[in-house]
Image: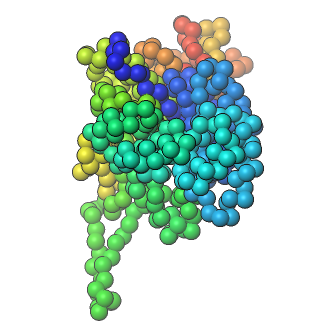
Amino acid sequence: MNNKLKKPELLAPAGSLEKLKIALAYGADAVYAGLPDFSLRTRVNDFNLSELKKGIEYAHKLGKKVYLTFNIYPHEKDLKKVPKAFAAIKKLQPDALIISEPGMVAMARKLVPKIPIHLSTQANSVNSEAVKFWMKQGVERVILARELSLKEIKEMQKKVPKAELEIFVHGSMCMSYSGRCLLSNFFTGRGANQGKCVQPCRWEYDVEIKEVKRPDEGLKVIEDVHGTYFMNSKDMCLMPYLKDVIESGICSLKIEGRLKSIYYVAIATRAYRLAIDAYFDDPKNFDAKPFLKELETTRHRGFTYGFALGPDPKMQDPETACSLEKYQFVGLVKKYKDGFIHLEARNKVSLGEKVELVAPGNTKVHSFILKEIYNLAGERQKVAHGGLQAVVKIPFPKKVAELSMIRKKV
């Protein structure tokens, strides 16, 4: 056990009440969720105030935390809604608010002074003086910009040892990294910093150069036969460098993905939970490879270390914006009763297929051949169909934890 370092918090995404429960079950110490109308995921946000209340109460019963994102850059018209929103937040009693800009920090300190403030990565904090400044404004934690290297982060932590510093360790990255991008505004009129980004950085572009005095003579700039996705960033993955991340002294390790699937949330959270625990159990012999292998079972755009070691020259994928997928999520275990897994099917699976059972906690992934499928009436089926979230029964010799998952290779 490493006694010199404090074990960092593992912070996972919660885009819905279901994802919140799954993130906590699979090892998150805390989750972050979006407040309707005021987070950077307003286009797709499955939470309402009633469900947020349930989620916060659920987490607190487990001794875990919920941080609410209030991280849009509000225009003048948006300010009218802020007092009412803060009044609602006060009743919810979250463990912190994630805020991006000084106006909102000032209003939060005035209207909800007892709720801690975490400064969003959108604020683009890249040095210790910025951290000191925000601490003087009443901010308790600073989520650092993604443009920083681990060397820089470690140096910053030494200069502000009392500051809580948080970094992203896994998930999709904005082309603008800290998120201050105007492409969505330019192409569609939907403001990225108002939570309405349409992700133009994932689009394919056909770029044409024209000489000013010869406008009819164009020259197309083409990457290769696959197209030109020159702004498409790979996904961040710092698992191979987790030892260095932990030893930098960071207080919280954050996984991106409020819009991702429940399978992604479960597997990513579980992998980092087990990896962090493994490091603290035996730091000298820590090996990240098994945990990286698990992360590769989720959908991703290829992995990059971003700026952790200095800018990764292979950070962008100019050939495609499609995600890699080695495994497919089959279904969610709702309960185990009388020797049967009750599985809520999310994707099609058939008799004879080899599947894997992944459970919360430090248990091995169990592989088996699917030999029997029954509906709830006890009738034998050849196939379990996804999409309708129908529950089927699968015989299994051992008790299986609720919220376990079944997957298959594709």
Residue at position x 66%, y 40% in the image: 113
Nearer to the camera, 322 or 396: 322
Residue displayed at 61% across by 20% down:
63
Question: In this rendering, would 211 be left or right of 236?
Answer: left
Q: How is the image coloured?
A: rainbow
Q: Nearer the viewer, residue 314 or 33?
A: 33
- Residue at image point 65% right, 11% down: 337
Q: Residue at x 67, y 60 (%)?
A: 78
253 horizontally vs 372: left or right? left
- Measured as percent of width and height from the top left, residue 396 is found at 55, 11
Q: Residue furthest bottom?
A: 213
Q: Is residue 162 visible?
A: yes
Residue closer to the observer: 323 or 162: 162
Q: Quadrant of residue 344?
A: top right
Which quadrant does the N terminus fall into? top left
The location of residue 170, given as percent across then percent down, is 41, 38
Residue 56: where, in percent of width, then height?
A: 67, 30
Say which quadrant the C terminus sits in: top left
Q: Is residue 409 visible?
A: no
Place residue 6 in its image quadrant: top left
Q: Nearer the viewer, residue 249 or 201?
A: 249
Q: Is residue 139 above or below residue 74?
A: above
Q: Residue furthest front?
A: 136
